[in-house]
Amino acid sequence: MQTRLPPFASALLAAAFACVLADSPALASDRTVILMLFDGFSPAYVEKFDTPNLNRMRVEGAFTDRMLPPFPSISLIGSFTIATGCWPKHHGIVTNKFLDPEKGLYDHSIDADWLTGCETLNVAAERQGIQTASLGFVGRFSGTKGDLASIVSPARQWVDYPDDHGRADQVIAELQKPAADRPRLILAYFKGPDAAGHFTGMDSPETKAAVETSDAVVGRVLEAVAAAEGAEDIAVLVTTDHGMKPVEQVVNIARILRRHSIPARAVSTGTTSFLYFEDKSDAVIDDALVTLSTYLELDVYRKEDAPKEWHLGTGPRVGDLIVSAKPPLFIEDIEEWPWFTHFLQYIGPDFLDSSASLKATHGYPSDTPGVEGILYGWGSGIAAGREVPSVRAVDVHPTVMRLLGAEPGEPVDGVVATGLLDGAAAEESHAAGVADSGAGER
């Protein structure tokens, strides 16, 4: 027999239930997530310069100053690792420049057609019905399939990107839409302090100005979130592709190969050179390995013997030998040098002073102090006042998808960084099958 409540009791019960719902945290299915990536933002900049808005995120949200990039710790491999939640051996972007036996030379392309596997955040979200805006983010378009998000910024070349305030304008325009029309995932790439750090040094006035611009941009977005419809359901994540370290010398890899008659093509960027041999016999490659290993300034590995924590794999895109310069050295191919220095590949020294070119760079293994980046979270679903010891670049993707209440891309190597999340978001079960990382709470 069914018991009916008297009308006054039903009304009281409904009111109580409404109060509970009002005090409950936002459901992941209602949440909007903004991921802002500032190129080359070293944690050292937060300590060196005035960054009140990032400091606010540290106090009111959760953060780590050890966001560990993949190896090599440079832009495209770092950005694609963040976007896919996969290691380079799975997504296929193994450095900023490499040779593909069928497609030829990869050179800083953001075209998703270069991926060999894994789904970017925008693809995984759109597949699950989550409207996405991808503003300057890698993998937002495919040369064969077109745009891969509902809203895509038009510029396809870095040189045509807006400045960081212009990019902030694009983010804010999306936030100002009614909640029902707003994309629930907003991915935004910012040029950040990368170029200033490279060419003027980490302590220069130019770098200080670039860092303060980045911080001001963060402040503008936080203000726009506060003014947006459904502000209580918006989360903001701020990260980077890599940090930065001072450098002093450039490796003249072309001269070294000629000096020792090593029959390999060097494809270099950052602090790493991939050496590709036409003759792949063990005798030829091992002889080159022995010769190059006499240089104490370099770490040299056959690709099958590279440290497992590099996660590069042994596919054909990875050089037969991997040359990694030790700090404070870096490597760039001779073609990247001014034309009037090209003679140095024939008669120059093996190492040259770099003070006239780069003052700082990145690319070293992720356990090298200085190449780590920032990852700050604030808003809906983010823990308050919590520092996390470290988060890996591959963990950003599944963490974003957890905040959205969606499954991560397929496959995924990262885990949800639950240390960044509040209790409700950390316990949400929408990302079933993805491991959680509780590490980092303290």
Image (cartoon, rainbow, N blue to C red):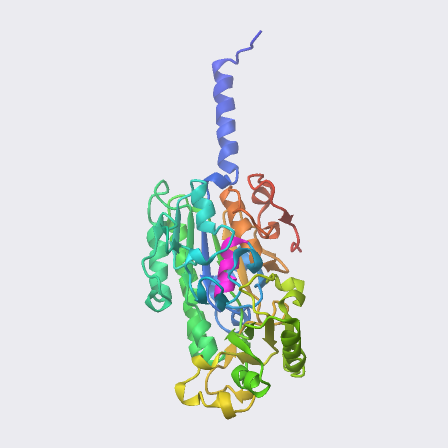
Q: 427 or 111: which is nearer to us?
A: 111
* Quarter of the image that includes the C terminus: bottom right
The residue located at (67%, 67%) in the rendering is 305
The location of residue 93, given as percent across then percent down, is: 51, 61
Q: Nearer the viewer, residue 22 or 345?
A: 345
Is residue 246 visible in the rendered structure shown here? no
Asked if residue 142 lies in the magenta stretch, the reply is no
Q: Nearer the viewer, residue 296 or 66?
A: 296
**Span colored in magenta:** 76-85
**Residue under the image location 58 percent in, 66 percent down:** 71
Left or right relative to 418: residue 82 = left
Q: Tell me if residue 137 comes above or below residue 10 in the rendering.
A: below
Residue 431 visible: yes
- In which quadrant of the rendered image does the N terminus lie? top right
Residue farthest top in this picture = 1
Locate residue 223, reporting x and y percent. Answer: 40, 55
Instruction: Determine if the magenta segment contains residue 81.
Output: yes
Residue at screen point 51% across, 28% down: 17
> 298 left or right of 171?
right
